[in-house]
Amino acid sequence: MKNFKWLSPTLYILFLMLPIYWLVSMSFKTTNEILGSFTLWPQEFTLSNYITIFTDPTWYNGYFNSLTYVMVNTLFSVSVALPAAYAFSRYRFLGDKHLFFWLLTNRMAPPAVFALPFFQLYSAIGLFDTPVAVALAHCLFNIPLAVWILEGFMSGVPKELDETAYVDGYGFWHFFVKIFLPTIAAGIGVVMFFCFMFSWVELLLAKTLTSVAAKPIAATMTRTASTSGYELGLLAAAGTLTIIPGAFVIWFVRNHIAKGFALGRV
């Protein structure tokens, strides 16, 4: 049995990779081949689906819009959560536990609860159909999550580190940026990963708060029906391309994710 220890994890990985392989394989097929026969690989290999995505403004603008609001949201959420988490970690003030719990309740609420208020608010102030609107809406969910995770990391750093830095003449922001942030780099990597992923896969608010100019790729993918039915090959190609940003983010923070999951509040 010891010689077959590799069998279970190998089968598990193959099982996990099967949908991804099938999606990539479909992206190189025509819709007629997908609907007409069951094939393990493309019988009529075609790049037309990818050519359509990279030449049609409706498609490539969808990717640009999605990446724009996701990156804006990630940077803004982390920037706001860092000082907030530090305050919860290092100070005690009236109502701190209640405020901390209230932040988490925002993450517990479904996006549909806030879709209509956001729609009316952003329409009134001229932010509707802009990437900024979606980025700010996602902050309602990502900032509480970021604060919660970062507070766990910061609480694991001894307060003596702060006191020693102040004795050595460091100002707060100098200490915070030069010493404290590198200490919790793993936590920041984990937070960026989660903020990016939650914002990237969220669909309801992204569709509700955009119409044409800032329509994300997920909304574009739901409108591929034609007179002959859904263009499955085109959908598969678009789905394949949506995997790439997430894979890149995982690669970028790969050195921090494992440590972050082991040490932080994740």
Image (spheres, rainbow, N blue to C red):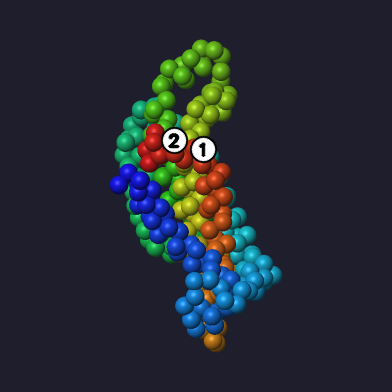
**Neighbourhood count class around disc 2 (C-alpha, 10 Å): few under 14, some 14–19, many 20 upward:** some
Mark 2 is on which residue type? Lys
Q: Residue at x 44, y 39 (%)?
A: 258
Q: Are marks 2 and 1 in contact (CB under 8 Å)?
A: yes
Q: How many marks?
A: 2
Residue 204 occupies which quadrant of the picture? bottom left
| Mark 1 residue type | Asn
Residue found at the far bottom of this picture: 227
Numbered circle sitting on residue 255? 1
Residue 50 place in picture, x, y as percent: 63, 69
Regarding residue 252, the answer to whether it shows in the image is: yes
**Residue that mark 2 sits on:** 259
Q: Nearer the viewer, residue 226 or 141?
A: 226
* Element assignment for label 1: helix
Residue 176, numbered label: none
Q: Residue furthest top?
A: 167
Rendered-image quadrant of the C terminus: top left
Q: Nearer the viewer, residue 115 or 2?
A: 2
Name the residue: 53% across, 68% down. Answer: 25
**Horizontal and vertical percent for residue 76?**
54, 45
Q: Residue 23's spot in the image, x, y percent?
A: 50, 67
